[in-house]
Amino acid sequence: MSRTLILNATLVNEGEVFQADVLLIANRIARIAADLQHLRADRVIDATGLHLLPGMIDDQVHFREPGLTQKGSIATESAAAVAGGITSYMEMPNVNPPTLTRQALADKFAIARQSSAANYSFYLGASVDNLDEIKAVDPGVVCGIKVFMGASTGNLLVEDPVALENIFAESPILIATHCEDGKVIAANLKRLQAQYGIDLPVQFHPLIRDDEACYASSAYAVHLAKKYRSQLHVLHLTTAKELTLFSDLPLEQKQITAEVCVHHLRYCDEDYQRMGNLLKCNPAVKTKADQTALRQALRDGRLDIIATDHAPHLLCEKQLPYAQAPAGLPLVQHALLSVLDLYHQGELTLPQVVQKIAHAPAQRFAVAERGFLREGYVADLVLVDLQTPSTVTAQELLYRCGWSPQQGEILQSTLVSTFVNGVRRFHQGRLWPLPDEAWAQPQALRFSRN
């Protein structure tokens, strides 16, 4: 079995920051202790001056396969994720065909087995008529049921109250929701077009998809979860108003949790003038006051997880007029470094960063043996240099779409290495090849649910 020894690292794990050595045997963390340099190893990595974190578990990505592979694929976007310190991801069902059946799920798992650079799971999408499929999912394999309560099209948009009641009553696993009320959005659009004309600029995006549209839908989801005792996870919170719906109890005591995404923490409505449609996403980036409230809610425990909602589109699509330009941003390749900027700004401590990007998603989704630096756990790890800034350049991007909203930005840390299942897959700016051994291959996530 391959043996890797990481020496002199500063570990961040379970509320502590401490120096230790780490021995990896095959894909597992075998030892964490001081003074392991005497142990036999096939390779030794001197991590002096570097911080060792558990890899980020991103619970919300759109990798566009099958059917939309001109924008991205499981292969390309997972490679970018690994370059960004993401070692596991949970991918969304709005592809073509949409992931509404167990067979469609099986097809995506098959693609990932052949091409994914990181560990993976997939959501089953909810529709108005696939309740039997939802009830039959395997809780040990499928990360969750995704319900688009607004901001989707076709069968994936579920606004019918009877269908929603049935989903919340019958789902055997966690329900993850996109919450924006379509009626409020339509009324806002009609009012603003009457006042300002049909061809609105992108600066109106957060006014069309405003805090009331988000709150009305989030409050409805919370109501249904309380009524049926569903396990609910509300995705990508964007408003201060919605935060009143969520508790600051310890995560393990929560039935209802909430997530915030990197871009809603990093940008605000002042940035639309500069970034245009490159910042267009659903739900919309809101005000500076909302951004401040989201950051505070991370600190006080009302927001549990930081994710990306990585959603690539072609640059030519983003250059269309606002109404025609698609919503979504490619984000995985610089997600972890962007979250670490919150540490540099004094917004979060290092243990809080690790809690939100690794521990909490592992706990909330009951991911087996990942998300922590623990002996016996799978070695999904990231080495970061907190002292050396890095700049986002077009040349380094691994996204198929070829652009990032962060191009030209200076991030206050550098990602040195990413280990997936004990294998160093990314180091100093380039992807490394995957060994042939079975233990080294990216794996489907397993969930330890009752």
Image (tube, helix red, strand yellow):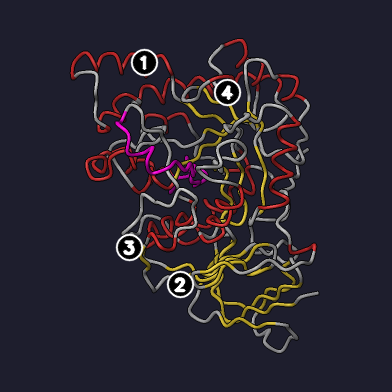
Viewer-proximal residue among 190 and 345: 190
Helix, strand or loop for disc 1 = helix
Instruction: Answer whether labels 4 and 1 touch (C-beta < 8 Å).
Output: no
**Dominant secondary structure of the magenta stretch?**
loop
> What's the amino acid at mark 4?
Leu
The residues bearing labels 2 and 1 have C-alpha atoms spaced at a distance of: 46 Å
The residues bearing labels 3 and 1 have C-alpha atoms spaced at a distance of: 38 Å
Q: Which residue is mark 3?
A: 410
Say the numbered circle drawn on residue 156. 4
> What's the amino acid at mark 3?
Ile
The residues bearing labels 4 and 2 have C-alpha atoms spaced at a distance of: 41 Å
Q: Which residue is mark 2?
A: 385
Does 308 lie within the magenta span? yes
Instruction: Tell me the mark number nearer the camera, choosing from 4 and 2.
Output: 4
The residues bearing labels 3 and 4 have C-alpha atoms spaced at a distance of: 38 Å
Q: Reading the chain from its start, which is encountered first: label 3 or label 1?
A: 1
Mark 1 is surrounded, within 10 Å at the Cα level, by few (under 14), some (14 to 19) or many (20 or more) other residues, namely few
- Residue 119, image x and y in percent? 67, 53
Instruction: Give the residues in magenta.
Output: 298-322
Q: Reading the chain from its start, which is encountered first: label 2 or label 1?
A: 1
